[in-house]
Image: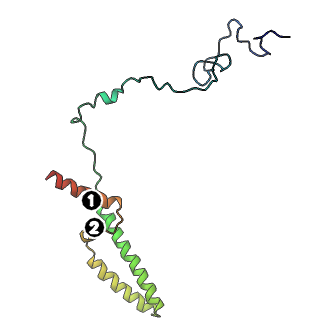
Amino acid sequence: GRAAGQSTGGQSAKRPGAEPAVGAMYNGIGLTTARGSGTSGYVQRNLAHIRPMREDFKRLKDFSQAEAPRVRKANLELLEHNEKRKIEVELVKLSDELEEQGKTEEEIEAIVSDERQRRLKELDISKALQMDDGQKDTHRQALEKEKQMEKLSA
């Protein structure tokens, strides 16, 4: 039989000059294998290790040097476009109602066209922005933030 500790074949751990190949580490801890290390091989992070302080934060100790956060500007064209979309949705609903009432295509088109012109004349983006419909997109939020910042700086 074999004596205890003898290998069953393959690479012997006690052979002279049997250095592990470069990069042949077990879980990146410097062992080639967990065998013979007296551990299960499970690697944990050392939570007691104190890492060196980051260099990029040392330079920003004086926050007065730091630049102010950029405030994204609201795009009024997009806000106006959204208001026009709302009008168009209402006009489609109106045309469906008129169609159910039995109006002809020409009558529906004339009524919807008149209503579109009237609503687009009434469209005032500042009034539309003041109305709070519960949903706020990023551009409306940015516009409100700009107004808030103006009040605070004044």
Identify the residue at the far left of this view. 154
Figure label count: 2
Q: Residue 106 placed where, x, y %?
A: 43, 91
Which residue is tagged 2?
Answer: 129
Asked if labels 1 and 2 touch by Cβ distance under 8 angstroms, the answer is: yes
Separation of residues labelled 2 and 1 (CA atoms):
9 Å
Secondary element type, mark 1: helix
Front-most of residues 135 and 107: 135
Identify the residue at the far right of this view. 1
Instruction: Work out which quarter of the rendered image holds the N terminus and state it.
Output: top right
* Residue occupying the point 13% across, 53% down: 154
Residue 90, image quadrant = bottom left
- Disc 2 residue type (three-letter): Leu
Q: Is residue 10 above or below residue 91?
A: above
Which color scheme is applied? rainbow
Q: Residue 104 placed where, x, y %?
A: 46, 93
Q: Earlier in the sequence, mark 2 or mark 1?
A: 2
* Residue occupying the point 32% across, 65% down: 79
Q: Residue 11 placed where, x, y %?
A: 74, 14
Q: Residues within 10 Å of mark 1 (few under 14, many from 20)?
A: some
Secondary element type, mark 2: helix
* Image side of residue 49 versus residue 63, left or right: right
* Image side of residue 77 versus residue 41, left or right: left
* Residue occupying the point 47% across, 26% down: 47
On residue 154, the disc is: none
Which residue is tagged 1?
Answer: 143
* Image side of residue 146 versus residue 50, left or right: left
Q: Residues within 10 Å of mark 2 (few under 14, many from 20)?
A: some
Q: Is residue 13 above or below residue 64?
A: above
- Disc 1 residue type (three-letter): Leu
Q: Residue 127 placed where, x, y %?
A: 25, 71
